[in-house]
Amino acid sequence: MIFSKMTKKIFVMGTISLIFLCLALVSSLLLNMQFVTKTINLEIFLKVGSLFKNIGIIGIIGTLGATIEYSKLSLSSLAKLFLEILAYTISISTFVLAVNVTSITKFALIQSILPFINKNYWIIGVILFGLILLTGLKYLKSSITPKLIISGIFIIAAFLFIFSLVFSNRNLLLMIAWSLFVFLVSSYLTNQNLITRVAYVLVPFFVAVLGMILTLIVRTPSLQIEHALLIDCVSFLGLSLLVSPNGNEKLHLFSTLVISRVFLGLMLLLLNPLVIGTLTKYTMLQVARSSTIYVLLRFYMCIFIIALGLIIVESFGVARRYLGVCNMQITIPVVVCMVSSTYLIYNGFQFLSSGIISLKNLQGNALYLELFNLVIILLLYLFIQGVLNRFWYSNFLFVMLMLILSYANYAKLQARDEPIIRPDFGMINSLPEIVKMVNMNVVYGLIAGLIGLTILAVILQRFFMKGPIFHWPLRVLVVLGSALLLYNFAQTENQMNLIAWKDKKVTDSSFLMASLTNAGFSAHPGALEMSSTHYGPAVTFMSTVIIKTMDKPNGYSQARINQIVEKYKRISRKINKTRKNRSLNKQTVVYVLSESYADPRMMPTVKLSSNPIPFEQSLAKHNTSGLMDSPSYGGGTANIEFESLTGLSMNNFDPSMVTPYVFLVPKVNNLPVITDYFKTKNAIHPYSGVTYNRTNVFKKFGFQHFYSFTGDKLTFAKRLDKSPYVSDDSAYRQLLKQINSTNKGQFIQLSTMQNHMPYHLGTYTENNYKATGNLTKASLDSVESYSQGLHYTDQDLKMLIKKVSKMKKHVTIVWYGDHLPGLYEGNLVSGKNLIKYDNKLHQTNYFIYSNFKHAKIKHTKVVSPNMFTPIMFKQTDTKVSAYVALLTEINNYVPAAERDKFMAQNGMYITYKQLSTKAKTIINDYKLIQYDITAGKQYSIKQGNFIK
């Protein structure tokens, strides 16, 4: 309780000083900006306002000095004050670092812990040094007479005055010297209760002199002597006010404690170099966007009011704590620091590979957006605090959740170029399998951290901050308020996703939408990695919270669906006139999803020392084959599998429908599936069936057996060398066993695992491929290991086809790579090249092989996964249902379509406007049918004979 003695006069002096300090800060920010609306009078006002900084600093220093109570000075009280200062500086610094990533330096955090080592934050050093001197002088008080002290004050004042005249260009040194002098003298004057009527003459005199000096500085701002005299005059004026007979009524102790902490907190905030730097940058950005002075002033006012409110609440808490009342208000700096630092980790982990420079380049100007990210994290923090209502439990749970989320986000970005999104939490049952794909040392570290934090939380909660955080009415308000605000974020961003998906302009339909847009946020539901690294992971995460199946297409009705059904029944009858086989029941059809299979040489500049896949290329040349437009890069296997099995397109769904296996299939019955056309149907996946909810999905799809680690037992499950996954050789032998299990026709779905990430050199004993290209060294190493895996796949495929070709039964294999591996890093896939080669990042290889003679199929150079079934029907010369007729028309007249982009037969993107009228009509029919089946009334299915 060092600052515990205050009069009305000191309160007024401190308040005016803070006003001067605020005015000076705002004036300095605006003075050098080129505003269209800035008039000559306004410029003069800003120049005068900027001069008030030194006045405000000396005034607030004198105010704090005057509130010191000598009897409270001790080493323990100094330590407590230092902790108070640290609570402000660390929380302010972490907040600023989170908002303004360009301010992140190796010394920024050190300076927040030791603020007095920053020369631009010298005022803290003055206060601490002054208090140390006063504490030391306290023990020498008996040997120093008041007369000697007064004489010393006059001598030092005279010396400083002469020093300022001689060294007028040393502004910083003068400010430090005079501030320390005013701090010490003001504390002495008030503790000795020195009052003199001479002040009635001195105060008006120094006010007049101050006015003259300010006038001279405005006219000739370059003269250093005038600035030095300003410091001298302000110092003498402040001390004169302290010895004035007026306004010496003492304030209540509690009021004194609160007000002095508010003064201290605001001073530390307004003079913090990081704060000033961030406000300067924000001002420059707004000027560049042609914002007016009034917009900026409104922003400054809002920030100041919020900061003042937090400081006042915290000051009340500190004052109550000093008076022996335990409370949670003193934890506000902890809250700010906790939220800011965890967001720094969450955001920074995205750039562990690319580095801090990449973070600064991508988010350096996103100050306003970083605030929104912090608000989202704060709301999550408050929700957890409200639910648990215990300080240590809620804080440690929050920290652990954020650390896990941060690493999971990093790991997923590395593996799939996609951040953690809300639907990922729907795969919680797959957690044991997912964990095996990441660095286990980190996982063990997180588990150890969780155990350690849990033990620490229990101990701390037992002895410190033991009570509830909120009482019931406030607790309910915090929980409901934070939940509703988070939902509002999710709802608003979902609307922005839809607007972006439809390529429309964002409207100011809500305050939050307008604010996000003004902050620079633009929804990119098809590019979540870019959104996360540019706009922040929290804002991006909220855009995936609300899951919607599809928007209702215009014209949807039972009558319209009936028309479409009849239309494609007619088309199916026309197609079937030339088809030989009545059904697929006597044929064996196999869909092989080859994990992450895509020729790396299709990527521009990437070359290999030799061809790793000669057999697959030869086979493709003599069979139906081409490129598949994949909706994903580096992942999303289940979505591609979903398209191929159902014929439904991810392109038609709402962008929030990221995993139909998890969020659509469980709640919708009667989905069209290729298994509908077979009596015998089995699935093979040499991995866990729990991943992507496959076990339940395949059961609903009608598969009679699902051979996996968690389902029916696999007969073949060998691995290659150090690979953690079952080899393609074993997968194909399992497939051959299933093909030979019956003489009847059947459908088999095989999803392999051999070429799944990670791709490390040393995974295979041999490494016969050297890669070159515009990629990083680590990426090229991964390409080499990956290519070796492709070679093994090629050899295993040769074995499979050789055996199938000798079978008497009719077998057709639809074989495709689901997506590119997420291993390409470097200049080839960054900056403008990322847009230029976007199509290349979504093209995989596919072929359809039949061990019997068949007609040559057209329109197959570039397809999307939903086209495999109609092509297979055509190659097997099988009659089609109305639904397959619709898919056939899509294959014949509509380009491959994924991620709201159309890919022509040459592999290049084309726009919707470039499509034929017939193609547009078919697309509209397709969307209506897909909506009807997945989100509508299923009129098409109720009619009968549409799917089968």
Image (tube, grey):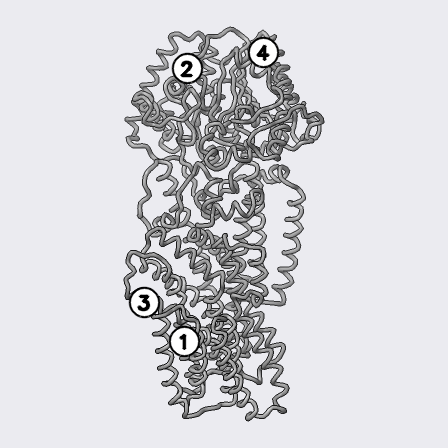
Q: Secondary structure at mark 3?
A: helix
N-term mark: 3 or 4: 3
Residue at image position (41%, 38%) is 548
The quadrant in which the N terminus is found is: bottom right
Whether the residues at callouts 3 and 1 have beta carbons within 8 Å, the answer is: no
Q: Secondary structure at mark 4?
A: loop
N-term mark: 3 or 2: 3
Q: Position of residue 75 (x, y in %)?
A: 63, 77
Whether the residues at callouts 3 and 4 have beta carbons within 8 Å, the answer is: no
Q: Is residue 710 visible?
A: no
- Marks 3/4: CA–CA distance: 96 Å
Callout in the foreground (3, 2): 3
Dot 4 amino acid type: Asn
Residue at image mark 2: 880
Q: Position of residue 882 (x, y in %)?
A: 38, 18
Residue at image position (57%, 16%) is 616
Dot 1 amino acid type: Thr
Whether the residues at callouts 1 and 2 have beta carbons within 8 Å, the answer is: no
- Marks 3/1: CA–CA distance: 24 Å
Dot 2 amino acid type: Val
Q: Secondary structure at mark 2?
A: loop
N-term mark: 3 or 1: 1
Q: Secondary structure at mark 1?
A: helix
N-term mark: 4 or 1: 1
- Marks 2/4: CA–CA distance: 23 Å
Residue at image position (53%, 86%) is 155
Residue at image mark 1: 15
- Marks 1/2: CA–CA distance: 84 Å
Whether the residues at callouts 2 and 4 have beta carbons within 8 Å, the answer is: no
